[in-house]
Image: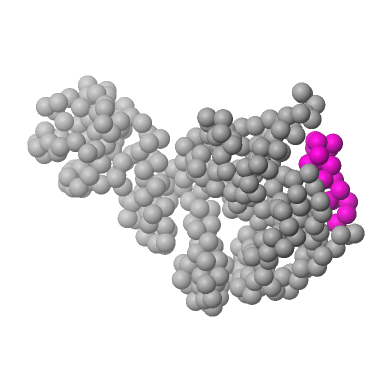
Amino acid sequence: MDEERCWRAVEGRDAAFDGKFVFAVRSTGVYCRPSCPARRPRREQVRYFETAQAAEGAGFRACRRCRPQDRRKAEAEVVELACHLMPRPLKALTGELGLSPQRLSRMFQRQLGVTLRQYADARRLGAFKAHVRNGGEVTDALYHAGYGSSSRLYEQAAAQLGMTPATYRRGGRGVQMNYSIVVCPLGRLLVAATERGICALYLGSSDAELEAALGAEFPEAERRRDEAGLGEWTATLVKHLDGAQPSLDLALDIRATAFQRRVWEELRKIPYGGTRTYSEVARAIGRPTAARAVARACATNPVSVVIPCHRVVREDGGLGGYRWGLERKRALLETEARCSPES
């Protein structure tokens, strides 16, 4: 190890080096992470080790303030810093952190459940969408978001936007979407579908409210009300909401980031009549510290009920949030508990 570089990291409490080495202090017998907030020792008292295990093998004990033996915590802080720097190109990012792309990607997989490339792609696409929604041109938006060329953006467009970037900028102009609004036990139910499957499922109190929600994402899409064409799907969903049909097997046409997809797949595993906490879902997808991110994925679920985000509750037993209101969430859970085959 380059001791001069290590000392600079220790002196500057540089969190980018957490997980890369630990430093030990001869006078105290304690070893720490580079970013430890404790007072800095004299340089001549410092030794460097590549791992916490090596420091302990040399007779040093872990600092109780920075807990350097907790690799997950150290990795989480490196990943958090990388996310903060993410607008930078990946080569520059890994160079600044002093990590190889492979090692940083493994950290992302352990901490976030997705690769470094997948996370960066999702961030870029999000920046592109925000730019064009604010009226920016597609060409300006793609370079503003960090795409090196238009081809890279168009490769991702079909899977994550559901249309070309230019079509997305035009508010979905040219996309054909049929929808139906019917009475259901929770008020009004809107079901919208493309030729591939259901793309939106909303609950509300009035047709106007639901139509406005559908139009907000794709204001220029060709939306056509079609009660007869979607009659079989809406009838199935109304029966489900009434507790008469516990299981659902409906074709979907939804787009998602890699993380959203993992969360939504896990939600569909929650049995009818059951619940899971946000923390339990996070642990199930291998992201035990990502309860808040799981909550965000639930909030962005475009097909409520089919992907049962209402079955996720808080650790303390509280309902948590729900896009269509907590009263509807409570009613859904009560119906499922009452009509579950296990009850």
Whether 240 is among the magenta residues is: yes
Please state, as top left, top right, bottom left or bottom right, where the C terminus lies in the image: top right
Which residues are the magenta region? 230-248
**Which residue corresponds to the image point at 65% horizontal and 49% vertical from the top-left?**
324
Q: Is residue 46 left or right of residue 149?
A: left
Q: Residue lying farthest right? A: 228
Which image quadrant is residue 154 in? Answer: bottom right
Residue at 27% x, 23% y: name it.
57
Q: Residue at x 38, y 57 (%)?
A: 85
Camera sees residue 39:
yes
Instruction: State the image coordinates of residue 182 (x, y, percent, origin top left).
Output: 82, 54
Magenta includes 124?
A: no
Quarter location, residue 249: top right
Q: Quadrant of the N terminus?
A: top left
Q: Is residue 273 left or right of residue 152?
A: right
Camera-side residue of 88 and 329:
329
Residue 21, given in percent of the width and then of the height, sits at: 28, 38
